[in-house]
Each structure stands twice: as C-alpha cells, then as structure tokens.
Image: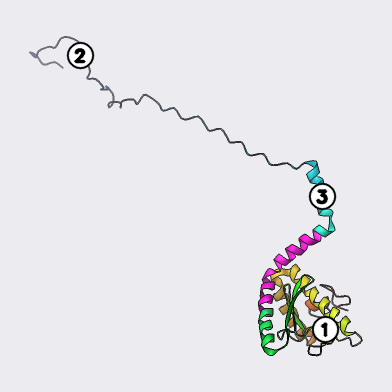
Amino acid sequence: MVRAGAPVLKGTFRMPSGLHVLGRRKPQGAEIMATPPPPAEPTARPAMPSLSAEKWRQLAHWQRDPEKGAAIRSLLGKAWNAPNTAIGLGYGLAGYGLGKVMGKNPHIDVRKDSIQFTNNPLGGVGAITLGNAVVFNGNPYDPHDSDGPDWTNDKAMSPLEAARNAEGHELQHVKQGEQLGPLYLPSNLLGGAYSLIRDHQWHGPSNWNERGPGANPPRPWARRPQ
C-alpha cells in the first residue's frame, strides 16, 4: 500500500542478480548434473585348459597301471605314516646309541619299505614297530643269533624261517601304520589294553592289531577266530 504523498518510482523494477523469488539463491552450476561413468564391462574369465583325447588316454592308462598305482599308494601311505615314523626313528636312534654303549653291535638297515634297527636294546620282547621304523631286540636275520629273543613260538621253524616270520609280522604293522596314520598308536594301545582285560595278554586274539600279523600267512588285519 502506497502512503499518500510518497514519491512514486517510475520505470522497470529489476530483481538483484542471482535471487529467486520463492527460495534461496541457487548455487552456481547446480543445474548441471554429473553424468555417471558407464558400467565396467565384466572381465572375461580365463579359459580352462582342455585335455586332448591323447592326454585322456594317457591318464586312463596311468590309472590302470598297477605298478604306478601301487607306487603312488605307497608314497601316500608313507606320508600319512610320517608322524609315527618320526617317533620310531627317535626311539630307534636312542636304542642304537644305548646298544653301542652296551656293546650289542647295533645296526641300521633299510629293507622292504622300512628302516630296521637290529640288536637294539629298546626292541622290547622281540620287536617294536613305529611307523616305517622297526626296532628289533636281536637280529632275526642272523641264524646264529643267540642273544635275541625267540622269534616265533613254533619250534618246528628253522632260524631262517623264524627270521622271515618275524620280519613278515612287523611289516604288517608297517602297513597298518600306512593305513591308520596318526590313529595307529591309539589303536595299538586300545587293542592291547582290551586284550589284557579279556585275554590276560597283550598279543591275545582280542587285540585287533595283532591278529592279522600273527596269522599264517601274515596280513594287516584278520577277524577274531570263532
């Protein structure tokens, strides 16, 4: 409302630059929208190498090769049995040093997938197998061994046959270790304790670890006789 007597302004009225009638001033460049970058193209996955028909035939032949298959299984078994073998080597070497002091003429040999300690005073009543290490009290390969224990209960066996029987028995324990791995020692302790309770002897028929090696011919496992 114009007061009476007030001067009247003539001409065009201009709004100050940058003002907006209904709101605050827009920031410079607000009307310019940022264009989002285009989506990245998915990287192509590297192609998997394909086997030719000839390679497949070679692989199938390798799997059917009994010698190569047995070698692979033996290698894997020794790796699985390695913790037991480490204990057996330490045990056998300790007995080897003790045997030197005692004048027992101890020996270390590698025979049939095992490291064998002979004339070792830590061989127990006959022999102890830990992993791929076998510790013999005497020397079952010496037919004139009079210092070692009896290698078999079968008195009809010759010394050479008894030695083969002792070696065959312990090699079955080696195979047990390659199959059971770290469970080998707990299995022996449980089997021996169970046999002591039931049969009143460690090597009784209730000890599942001794039934197979004690069979004729020896083998890793055998059922309990009826």
Image point (69%, 76%), residue name: 88
* Residue 26: quarter of image: top left
* Residue 126: quarter of image: bottom right
Q: Which residues are magenta?
A: 69-91
- Residue 24 higher or lower than 200, as above or below: above
- Residue 15 higher or lower than 211, as above or below: above
Q: How is the image coloured?
A: rainbow
Q: Secondary structure at mark 2?
A: loop
Q: Residue furthest left?
A: 5
The amino acid at mark 2 is: Phe
What's the mark number on residue 142?
A: 1
Q: Earlier in the sequence, mark 1 or mark 2?
A: 2
Q: Secondary structure at mark 3?
A: helix
The amino acid at mark 3 is: Ala
Quick check: is 82 in the magenta stretch? yes
C-alpha separation, residue under disc 1 versus residue under disc 2: 128 Å
User: Which quarter of the figure is the C terminus placed in?
Assistant: bottom right
User: Which quarter of the figure is the N terminus placed in?
Assistant: top left
The crowd level at tag 3 (other Cα within 10 Å; few <14, some 14-19, many 20+) is: few
Where residue 12 sits: x, y (%)?
Answer: 20, 11
Q: Which residue is mark 2?
A: 13
Q: Which residue is mark 3?
A: 60
Q: On the rendered structure, is 20 left or right of 141?
A: left
